[in-house]
Amino acid sequence: RGAARGAARGAARGAARGAARGAARGAARGAARGVARGVDRGAERGVDRGAERGVDRGAERGVDRGTERGVDRGTERGVDRGTERGVDRGTEQAQRDTKVTHLPVPDRIEPLAPPHTGYTVSAQPVLYFYLSDPSSDPIHFMLNRKDQVDPVFTTIVKPTTPTGRIKPGFHKIDLSKHGIRLQRDIEYEWFVFIILDETERSSDFLASATLTYMNSVAAKTGPDNLAVANYYAANGIWYDAIHNLNAMLDQQPDDTNLRQQRKRLLEQALLPETVRFEKRMIAAGL
């Protein structure tokens, strides 16, 4: 009986101790394994998620910062480079333009007037002159009275092209637009000229003509301007004859008959250079 009781007690105590130790060891091992697995899985998942989030956030921040910096730097560099290049190119273009802007003095500048004193029946006539070549120099006009020292009127002919040049051909000075009236039976002299040297005015490139306002011939008007021009030409009123022809040609520049009439009037005034110009215009159909 004692042996049996001892065995039973020993078995009970061993079972209890074994269970306790097994539970402790199992708990310890389970906790260790759980922690190890948790750490491994947590680390793996954390790395994956961190990498994914990092890439997303990094990409988003990179795009934002890259765009912002790119715009700022691009704008700054673009403005700087554009300004620099624009200034350089503008300077180069200005230098090229300067080289070609100033043209040689035209071969001829000539009043459209007879070799003697011409007549007009208008107190405010329109005066014309011929320029053989384009000019980058201003054309000056001056009107003098023979009995006065100071000029009656001066002006400058404005450029007739966007390039700032005065084109070749016929040009006019309308005294009525400047409020200038001639005195009857007084001889005037008018000049067209280019100033070559401001300090040496005797070198001016110029031409001149004379005119007198008179009323011994009646002024004529009518619907047929060609008949009016012929009337003035027949009566020696040269300035009004050429003006009527020029006014008609302004309205009908392709009228060959009018150009032929003007050519004949220029021939009568002994203006061979202007006659050659007119012939070229007629031949070219201009």
Image (cartoon, rainbow, N blue to C red):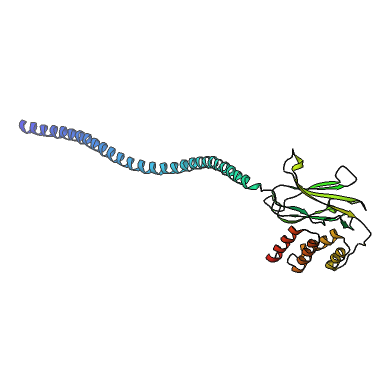
- Position above or below: 107 against 226: above
Q: Residue at x 87, y 63 (%)?
A: 232
Q: Residue furthest right?
A: 216
Total numbered labels:
0
Res 2 → quadrant: top left
Judge by depth and name the residue closer to the eye, 163 or 67. 163
Q: Quadrant of the N terminus?
A: top left
Query: Residue 115 versus residue 71: which sits nearer the camera?
Result: 115
Does 70 appear above or below 272? Answer: above
Decide which of 191, 34 is in the foreground and name it.
191
Q: Quadrant of residue 45?
A: top left
Residue 130's quadrant in the figure? Answer: bottom right
- At a point 74% along the width and 61% down the height, the residue shown is 275
Where's residue 175, x and y in %? 84, 52
At which x and y percent is residue 270?
79, 59
Q: Along the line of sight, which residue is nearer the eye, 193 or 137?
A: 193
- The C terminus - image quarter: bottom right
User: Where's residue 110, x and y in %?
Assistant: 77, 53
Residue 18 in view, yes or no: yes
Q: Position of residue 202 (x, y in %)?
A: 77, 42
* For residue 281, side relative to residue 183 (left or right): left
Residue plotted at (25% across, 37% down): 36
* Residue at horizontal 78 percent and vertical 64 percent from the top: 262
* Left or right of residue 60: residue 158: right
Note whether residue 179 is visible. Answer: no
